[in-house]
Image (tube, grey):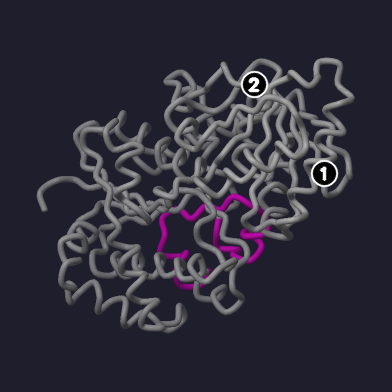
Amino acid sequence: MNQEIIYLVAHSGAPNYGDELIPKLWLDFLTAKYPDKTIIVDTLRPGLATSFWGFQYRNVHFVDTLFQLVERLNNLGVDFTKADEQVEKFLTQKLPKLDFGIDLLLSAQSIHFVGGGYINGISRSFRGQFKLFLLANAAKKINPSIKLFATGLGLTPIPEQFVGKLNDVIIPNFDVFEVRDEETAASLPNATLGFDDMFLGFSDVMREKKTIAYDLDKPKINILLQRHLQGRDEIEATLTPIFDYLKTRDDFNETTPINVVESISPDDGWLAGAIKRYTPNPIVFTTAKDLLWNGFPAAPDSIWFTTRFHFHMIAAANGFAGTFINTGGAYYDVKHGSLAKLGTGWRNYAESGDMTPEVSATFSETAQKLGNLKYQLAEKIYL
C-alpha cells in the first residue's frame, strides 16, 4: 500500500448517540490535522456509519474487517485466553473476502481504539469483542511499525479470566492505553486512568469548531429512559416521581411541552408512547436521527432526567441540571459514578430517592479543562 493509513476502531452503526459522536470527534480532529491521509474506521455496521458521517469527509472509509474476524473467532468457539495462534493464522493466511481488509489493517501506521463501553463482560457479544485487542496485538507482531492506541475505554465488568492476559500481555504492547473509570483501572494497573473521549468535544479548539452540534429549539424538560440493562417495570415506574417533581415547579402545567429523547433507535422509542399514561402534556419526540443530524437538545435552562451516560455528561458540561437514574445495577453505577467523581453535581435518584435536578456551577469549567487535556493527548498520539 502506498498511502498513509490511520486506522480507528469504534462502535458506530447502532445508532447510539455516544458511540456515533465519539468517532466523529476523532474524525474531525484527524481530518483537520491530516487532510491528505486515508482514515479507516473499523466498526460494527459500516454501512449505517457511512450514512451518518461518511458524506462529511473526503478520505474516510468505513469497514468491518476486525468485527468480522471477531465473529469468525466466536463462531469457532475460540477462547480469549487461548486464541493467539488462531488469530495470527487469520491475519497471515489472508482469509477469502477479508484479505483486502486485512492488507489495509496490516498497512496501517496506527490502530486506535476510540473510547466507549463496547468491550466488556455484560453480554456474550460484548465479551467476544475483547478479541479485538488480540487482533490488534497480532497485527503489531506481524508489522512492528504499527503503533497501538486506546483512549477513553470503559471495560468494566472484565471477565476475571481475561484480566491477566489483558494487563500483562496486551496492554504493554500499546503505546497508549487509557481507561475512563477507576474500576477498570483498578483491574488493569498497567492501563492509564483518564476520562471519556467525549470530553474532546469540550476542548477550546473543538468547541470553536462546533464539533458537537446543539438544537436550541427543543422543550427544556428532557426525559430519556432506556429499558436495556435496566429493570423494565422499575424504569417505567420512575415516571411517577419525575412528574411528582415537575408538578411542584412554578413553570410547569398541563400545557408545558416535554422532550422525549431517543438515543438508540428504536429501543428508546418506547417512552414516547408510555409517557402518555402519566401526563396529558404535549410530547415532542427527538429521534436518534434528530440527535445526530440536528444536535443535542440545549434549550436555555434545560433540565434532564436520564439513564444514559453521555447525556449526563454533555448536559452537565453545558450547565444543565439533571437527575441520573439507574435501576439496572453495577454497569451503569460505574459509568455515572465516573462522572459524579469528576464533579457534575447531578442528583443520583437511586441513592437519594429525590428527582430534583441539580448541577455543579463549576462543571462546565471542569469539562473544558478535561477537554483540553484530552486534546493534548490527541496531539501527543498523532505527532
Counting residues from the start of the chain, the first of labels 2 and 1 encountered is 2
Residue at screen point 63% across, 33% down: 260
**In the image, is residue 73 above or below residue 268?**
below
**In the image, is residue 270 above or below residue 251?**
below
Quadrant of res 61: top left
Furthest-left residue in this view: 2
Please rate how many residues cluster around mark 2, counting C-alpha atoms within 10 Å: few if below 14, some from 14 to 19, many from 20: many
Kind of residue indicated by mark 1: Tyr
Quadrant of res 367: top right
Q: What is the magenta range?
A: 167-191
Element class at badge 2: loop
Q: Which residue is mark 2?
A: 219
Q: CA distance from mark 2 to mark 1?
A: 22 Å
Can residue 196 be found in the magenta stretch? Answer: no
Residue at screen point 41% across, 48% down: 12
Q: What label does residue 74 carry, if any?
A: none
Across and down, in percent, residue 211 comes to 44, 26
Q: Nearer the viewer, residue 221 or 211?
A: 221
Across and down, in percent, residue 268 comes to 58, 45
Quadrant holding the C terminus: top left
Kind of residue indicated by mark 2: Pro
Q: What label does residue 349 carry, if any?
A: 1
Element class at badge 1: helix
Q: Nearer the viewer, residue 254 or 195?
A: 254
Q: Is 63 displayed left or right of 282 in the figure?
A: left
Residue at screen point 32% across, 53% down: 42
Residue at screen point 24% across, 59% down: 105
Please rate how many residues cluster around mark 1, counting C-alpha atoms within 10 Å: few if below 14, some from 14 to 19, many from 20: some
